[in-house]
Image (cartoon, rainbow, N blue to C red):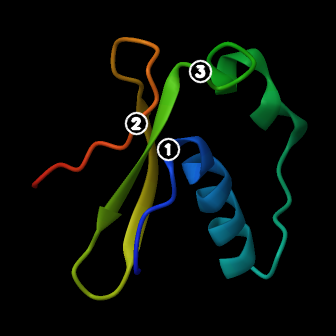
Amino acid sequence: MTGLPDPADMSHAMLVALLMHHGGSMDLPAAAFETDALGDGRGAHHAVELAPLGNDTFRLSVVARPPGDTAGIEVRDR
């Protein structure tokens, strides 16, 4: 991976990467879009984590959103 997208584009980039890796589409149950699944109907209570695994792969996870409303990319050492 050569560089990370801007924070505003990160969710879109991750969604596109995930879908393209799985052939361009995935089937999801309608319940995946319910408020309980997304947090507030927009996913605002969730953040994404992109963790390098060290073998030219990454793990994409949904994690609890940190406090505050500012967007950004936080790089953490594990």
Asked if the residue at tag 1 contacts the one at tag 2, i.e. Cβ–Cβ closer than 8 Å, the answer is yes
Question: Which mark identifies residue 7?
Answer: 1
Question: Which mark identifies residue 31?
Answer: none
Picture residue at 29% right of the left edge, 70% below the top: 52
Picture residue at 84% right of the left edge, 69% below the top: 25
Q: Amino acid at mark 3?
A: Ala
Which element type, helix, strand or loop, lies under badge 3? loop
* Residue mark closest to the camera, 1 vs 3: 1
Measuring from the top left, give residue 56's x and y in whole percent. Answer: 33, 87
Picture residue at 67% right of the left edge, 52% below the top: 12
> Horizontally, is 36 left or right of 75 in the view?
right
Dot 2 or dot 1: first in sequence order is: 1
* Residue mark closest to the camera, 3 vs 2: 2
Q: Locate the N terminus by quadrant.
A: bottom left
Picture residue at 59% right of the left edge, 20% below the top: 44
Q: Amino acid at mark 2?
A: Gly
Is residue 55 depicted above or below 11 in this figure? Answer: below
**Which residue is at the far front?**
6
Quickly name the residue at label 2.
72
**Which residue is at the far left?**
78
